[in-house]
Image (tube, rainbow, N blue to C red):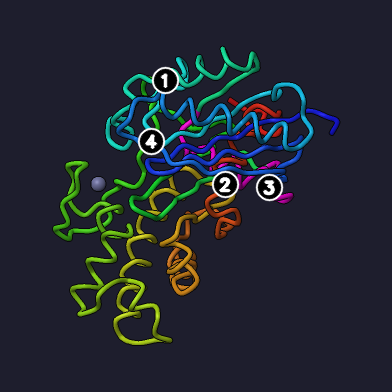
């Protein structure tokens, strides 16, 4: 096989997904491994290396990859290439991800937060988004993740920190969150919050509510989710003027098709809000890998 090849790694609290890519975003092969996040990083690294080697040799690549991009559940220190995440990677304190892979493979290695790589993966995969300079992605799952592209670069805060837009306050409701706030988006619109709301309506789970074709419980859950999401988007669109907003994650897959019209209508009444394209993410769980590879393949040329 000719041409350059890149590895994209998406590290989550429970799974590590490794993809092999060529110059374009199409994936050539994929391996999924358990993270075993309470074990030392060296154990996971010892599983990842043979998986990368097998991916490369299995596709006729005798040599090393030409670059390795990593999207890791945050916080991460992107300048020093370290993990700073005692929450979901407790066994990896200050794990030197970039140094470990660069030493083993001798190629360029880059590390970013996994929400940022998911946004990059979505943008580089859509022809109509390749030239987008301002974009926002919200991912709804166990938590509410966020990523912002601002003037073509990943938006960072003090000390290169990653913005936590999932903790925007959107309600007067008393829904306490580990962030210290009450009424934040994550405490009302994440998977656990919706499962709790479903139980309060007499259902075993959110899935049980949506297993039925329609009903009052579903309308209430969709209406409340749409309201909270619209409030967050109102503030974010007014602040950031994104050309495109992407919704990802399993909860958005379930609720967004039903909430889309409510959200669109809510935003359309804002006379100062710029026109924004709102789309559902297309890559699902693979977006982080696609974006990670794009960090080193040149498809995403920004910092
Ligand atoms: Zn919060």
- Could you tell me what secondary structure mostly forms the magenta stretch? helix
Q: Is mark 4 within 8 Å of ligand 1?
A: no
Of the numbered discs 4 and 1, the one sitting upstream in the chain is: 1
Kindly indicate whether the residue at mark 3 contacts the one at mark 2 (C-beta within 8 angstroms). yes
- Towards the viewer: 5 or 162: 5
Marks 4 and 3, Cα distance to the nearest angstrom? 24 Å
The crowd level at tag 3 (other Cα within 10 Å; few <14, some 14-19, many 20+) is many
Residue at image point 57% right, 59% down: 279
Which range of residues does the magenta coloring cover?
A: 112-131
Callout 2 secondary element: helix
Residue at image point 50% right, 34% down: 71
Callout 4 secondary element: loop
Marks 2 and 3, Cα distance to the nearest angstrom? 9 Å
Marks 4 and 1, Cα distance to the nearest angstrom? 18 Å
Residue 214: mark in rendering: none
Mark 2 lies on residue: 287
The answer to whether residue 41 is visible is yes
Looking at the image, residue 226 lies above or below residue 180: below
Residue 82: mark in rendering: 1
């Amino acid at each position: 096989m000719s041409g350059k090849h890149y590895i994209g790694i998406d590290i989550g609290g429970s799974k590590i997904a490794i993809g092999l890519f060529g110059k374009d975003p199409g994936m050539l092969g994929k391996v999924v491994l358990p993270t075993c996040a309470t074990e030392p990083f060296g154990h996971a690294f010892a599983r990842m290396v043979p998986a990368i080697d097998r991916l490369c040799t299995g596709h006729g690549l005798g040599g090393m990859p030409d670059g390795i991009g990593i999207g890791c559940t945050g916080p991460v220190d992107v300048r020093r290439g370290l993990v700073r995440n005692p929450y979901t990677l407790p066994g990896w304190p200050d794990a030197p991800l970039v140094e470990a892979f660069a030493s083993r493979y001798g190629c360029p290695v880059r590390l970013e937060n996994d929400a940022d790589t998911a946004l990059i993966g979505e943008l580089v995969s859509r022809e109509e988004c390749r030239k987008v300079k301002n974009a926002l992605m919200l991912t709804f799952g166990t938590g509410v993740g966020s990523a912002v592209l601002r003037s073509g670069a990943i938006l960072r805060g003090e000390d290169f920190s990653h913005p936590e837009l999932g903790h925007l306050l959107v309600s007067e409701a008393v829904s306490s969150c580990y962030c210290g706030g009450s009424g934040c988006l994550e405490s009302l619109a994440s998977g656990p919050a919706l499962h709790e709301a479903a139980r309060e309506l007499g259902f075993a789970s959110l899935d049980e509510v949506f297993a039925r074709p329609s009903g009052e419980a579903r309308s209430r859950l969709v209406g409340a989710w749409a309201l909270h999401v619209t409030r967050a988007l109102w503030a974010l669109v007014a602040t950031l003027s994104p050309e495109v907003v992407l919704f990802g994650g399993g909860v958005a897959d379930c609720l967004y098709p039903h909430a889309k019209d409510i959200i669109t209508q809510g935003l359309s009444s804002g006379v100062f809000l710029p026109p924004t394209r709102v789309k559902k993410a297309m890559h699902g769980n693979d977006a982080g890998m696609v974006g990670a590879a794009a960090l080193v393949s040149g498809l995403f040329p920004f910092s």
